[in-house]
Amino acid sequence: MDQRTLILITNDDGFEAAGIRYLAKCVGRWADVVTVAPDGPRSGQSSAITVNSELYLTRRADEEGAQVWSVNGTPVDCVKLAMHALFRERRPDLILSGINHGSNSGNSVLYSGTMGAVIEGCTLGIPSVGFSLLDHHADADFSECGRYVDEIARGVAASGLPSGICLNVNIPARCKPNGIKLVRASMGHWIGEYSQTTAPDGRTAYRLTGEYVDRDPDDSTTDNYWLGRGYVTVVPTGVDMTADCKDIACLREL
């Protein structure tokens, strides 16, 4: 008898977030699910790991037949600790991260804890996918995500991914998506990144805010272009950061 697909699920919003519960419910219909997620929000952690303090793996109440564990660390800590402590006898067939409350399109992937966990899974040779909904609210409506989460997760579970490649999936919010587009990540930068206030003790305090400026908003090969037009976007993401650039003037003589 064939084994059911085994999936490790994590996120950066915490094990109690609505998005991770919805993700586990979607894939739990056809796979065995183990959720290992931070014990609270860990957005913006990228691929950070905990190196100077102890980590604790805490069993929580099962949800719809799925094991649920929390870790007092980052999303990457969750993947690493899960592999060390829970998957000694059988590795997961698939690692899924999300569904994130908020966008991870464009070069947000560089900061994303959601995608940090996905990239960690990819370095381990496990097919890995991150899902994000473009709605950061705690009560975000994930009902239109199910079809696309299921289709993509089943496809990756069945066929795998090329070595060193993982997927970054973003889903538009508050609408029924028009379809799926396989695209590249848009490039841009943030402006007005911090608001400034005065703390009670008189010190100047800064809080992250700002506005994202797309470098080329009319480029139809990018994720932000199609997200703005109501499409789910899939961006293949590589873990090898070697740039394919052979004409760097200052290095020609090396």
Image: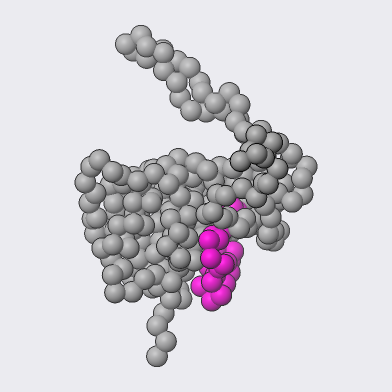
* Residue closest to the far bottom: 1
Q: How many marks?
A: 0
* Residue closest to the far top: 202
| 151 lies above or below 193 | below
* Residue depicted at 29% across the width and 74% down the height: 89
- The image position of residue 124, as x and y in percent, is 42, 62
Is residue 194 visible in the rendered structure shown here?
yes
- The image position of residue 198, as x and y in percent, is 41, 12
Q: Quadrant of the N terminus?
A: bottom left
| 233 lies above or below 138 | below
The one of 129 and 177 positioned closer to us in this rendering: 129
Q: Is residue 148 magenta?
A: yes
* Residue depicted at 53% across the width and 61% down the height: 164
State the extent of the magenta-drawn residues as a range: 147-171
Instruction: Name the quadrant containing residue 121.
Output: bottom left
- The image position of residue 111, as x and y in percent, is 49, 41
* Residue depicted at 59% across the width and 53% down the height: 170
The one of 165 and 208 positioned closer to us in this rendering: 165
* Residue depicted at 31% across the width and 68% down the height: 87
- The image position of residue 159, as x and y in percent, is 56, 75
Q: Is residue 140 magenta?
A: no
